Image (tube, rainbow, N blue to C red):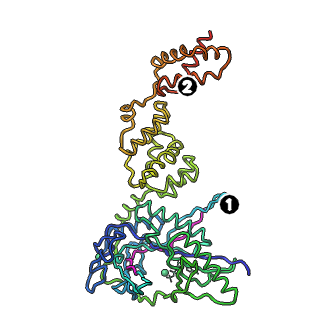
């Protein structure tokens, strides 16, 4: 059997995290009682009229810009007609002819220790808005199917890539980068287990070096990165085996069986003509003004990938740390503020990656729930750098700043945490310690230099650990030398 190449294109569905649905004002909240969040519009009662949620348009434009797409200024909706019990109105309102975004791309990082730094550009064919369908639950025992229409009308973005992937690793890297980016710009939670990020995998195989693409199948029901990865290698092997044995691949939709880890034929692939698409007559053209577009462009934050690169190249952080600190908007902004205040990105990164992340973990705090004053960590790091406070005390100050939003300066003063650096205060204490430890002092004088550590420790203890260690060391050494002369 000769070598083959796997070719994959993705259709990714993303649920937008708007409060209300795309064509009515029903809430989108996940996990409520079945059919509790429906009205005549999302349940598709005859005569009900859709009204477009502008927030959905804003999110779609933001996503289109983040994916470097061209935004369609005269966009519109189309009806995709089909019958299925989870869709009572008999059609999905989608965008076929004038999707909101076209011709974009996203770069993925495929670097590895073995092969060094590699990025690959995945082209985005288009991005469009549509409404989700309801959810069917099949109960084996009673042989009944239950219909929950609450998901009808939940806003979706469908992101369609060109067939640019050549391996499962590339697909997973793309989905991870996309998820981080969509969460960062605040349009979706991208929870795969709740179905707010769903990917359909279009896959074909061909002889290595062939120009033409092979016939593809489309796999649905992939609810984790692991499933995506498994499904790709299974389906590629299956197709190549069929071809090697002289067979042909059917253009069909297949279902991934998560338990058996096999893909199963589901139905012959419909083409666009079978959906009898036509322009949605109940919604007006969607005109995107240049003002709206300019505002969206101006408000688009620097994206996580770009931030990550900047943290590595300009701040000198390791890639791993840069990746973690740039993934969540709240964390990234806090890190940058901290680095600016303390003037030391590496130290800011150390504190964020260490003590700060530990606080988040220990208190199960999600990044968006962080309430610390944004200046606090930077101020604390400065205090340590300036020798005004010990590391141990700084951790205490941080805990309080995190839990109670206390101001570091005020907290340190109120709890008497400042280190003593005043020589006039420390010198008498040192003298007292040396007087009380005559034997050790004499031994030091006779050449037993390691007694310095002991005398330093005793002096530190005498100040209850509050002395600035460098000032104290200087005073003890000095005093010992004075004794010797
Ligand atoms: P349809 O409208 O029938 O779903 P599209 O041309 O829009 O078909 O493609 C859907 C998805 O299939 C896209 O993600 C595209 O990249 C991918 N695709 C198209 N041709 C192939 C192929 N030969 N092999 C793998 N993926 C493909
Ligand atoms: Mg399709
Ligand atoms: Zn509704």
Circle 2 packing at 10 Å, graded few (<14), some (14-19), many (20+), is some
Q: Is residue 101 above or below residue 272?
A: above
> Which disc number belongs to residue 115?
1
Q: Which residue is drawn at 54% across and 75% down?
A: 162
> Quick check: is the Cβ at mark 2 less than 8 Å away from ligand 1?
no
Q: Nearer the viewer, residue 355 or 432?
A: 432
Q: Mark 2 points at which residue?
A: 457
* Mark pair 2, 1: CA separation: 51 Å
Measuring from the top left, give residue 412's x and y in whole percent: 40, 33
Measuring from the top left, give residue 270's x and y in whole percent: 49, 88
Q: What stretch is highlighted in magenta?
A: 119-136
Secondary structure category for the residue under label 2: helix
Q: Is residue 54 visible?
A: yes
Measuring from the top left, give residue 304's x and y in whole percent: 49, 57
Q: Can residue 332 be seen in this view?
A: no
Q: In this view, does 350 lie above or below 212?
A: above
Answer yes or no: do the residues labelled 2 and 1 have beta carbons within 8 Å?
no
Measuring from the top left, give residue 62's x and y in whole percent: 41, 65
Q: Nearer the viewer, residue 44 or 221?
A: 221
> Which disc number belongs to residue 231?
none
Q: Is 320 left, or right, of 147 in this rendering?
A: right
Q: Which residue is drawn at 61% across and 17% down?
A: 440
Q: Nearer the viewer, residue 451 or 315?
A: 451
Q: In which quarter of the image is residue 57?
A: bottom left
């Amino acid at each position: 059997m000769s070598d083959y190449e796997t070719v994959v294109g993705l259709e990714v569905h993303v649920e937008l995290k708007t409060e209300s649905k795309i064509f009515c004002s029903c809430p989108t909240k996940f996990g409520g009682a079945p059919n509790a969040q429906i009205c005549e519009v999302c349940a598709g009662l005859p005569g009900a009229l859709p009204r477009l949620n502008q927030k959905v348009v804003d999110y779609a434009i933001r996503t289109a810009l983040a994916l470097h797409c061209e935004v369609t200024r005269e966009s519109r909706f189309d009806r995709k007609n089909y019958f299925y019990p989870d869709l009572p109105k008999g059609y999905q309102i989608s965008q076929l002819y004038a999707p909101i975004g076209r011709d974009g791309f996203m770069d993925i990082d495929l670097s590895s220790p073995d092969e060094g730094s590699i990025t690959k550009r995945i082209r985005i064919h288009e991005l469009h808005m549509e409404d989700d369908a309801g959810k069917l639950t099949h109960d084996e025992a009673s042989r009944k199917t239950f219909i929950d229409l609450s998901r009808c009308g939940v806003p979706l973005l469908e992101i369609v890539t060109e067939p640019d992937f050549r391996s499962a690793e590339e697909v997973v890297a793309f989905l991870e980068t996309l998820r981080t980016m969509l969460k960062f710009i605040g349009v979706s939670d991208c929870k795969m287990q709740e179905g707010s990020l769903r990917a359909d995998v279009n896959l074909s195989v061909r002889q290595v070096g062939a120009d033409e693409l092979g016939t593809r199948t489309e796999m649905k029901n992939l609810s984790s990165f692991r499933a995506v990865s498994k499904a790709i290698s299974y389906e590629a092997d299956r197709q190549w085996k069929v071809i090697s044995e002289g067979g042909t691949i059917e253009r069909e939709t297949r279902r991934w069986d998560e338990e058996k880890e096999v893909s199963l034929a589901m139905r012959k692939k419909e083409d666009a003509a079978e959906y009898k698409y036509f322009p949605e007559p109940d919604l007006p053209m969607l005109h995107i003004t240049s003002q709206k577009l300019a505002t969206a462009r101006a408000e688009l934050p620097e994206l996580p990938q770009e931030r990550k690169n900047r943290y590595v190249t300009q701040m000198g952080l390791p890639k791993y740390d840069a990746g973690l600190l740039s993934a969540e908007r709240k964390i990234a902004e806090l890190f940058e503020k901290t680095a600016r205040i303390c003037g030391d990105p590496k130290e800011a990164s150390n504190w964020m990656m260490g003590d700060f992340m530990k606080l988040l973990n220990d208190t199960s705090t999600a990044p968006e729930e962080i309430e610390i004053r944004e200046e606090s960590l930077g101020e604390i790091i400065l205090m340590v750098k300036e020798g005004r406070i010990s590391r141990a005390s700084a951790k205490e100050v941080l805990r309080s700043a995190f839990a109670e939003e206390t101001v570091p300066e005020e907290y340190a003063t109120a709890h008497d945490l400042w280190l003593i650096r005043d020589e006039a205060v420390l010198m008498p204490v040192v003298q007292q310690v040396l007087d009380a430890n005559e034997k050790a002092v004499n031994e030091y004088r006779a050449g037993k230099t390691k007694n310095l550590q002991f005398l330093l420790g005793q002096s530190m203890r005498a100040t209850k650990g509050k002395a600035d260690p460098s000032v104290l060391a200087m005073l003890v050494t000095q005093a010992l030398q004075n004794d010797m002369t």
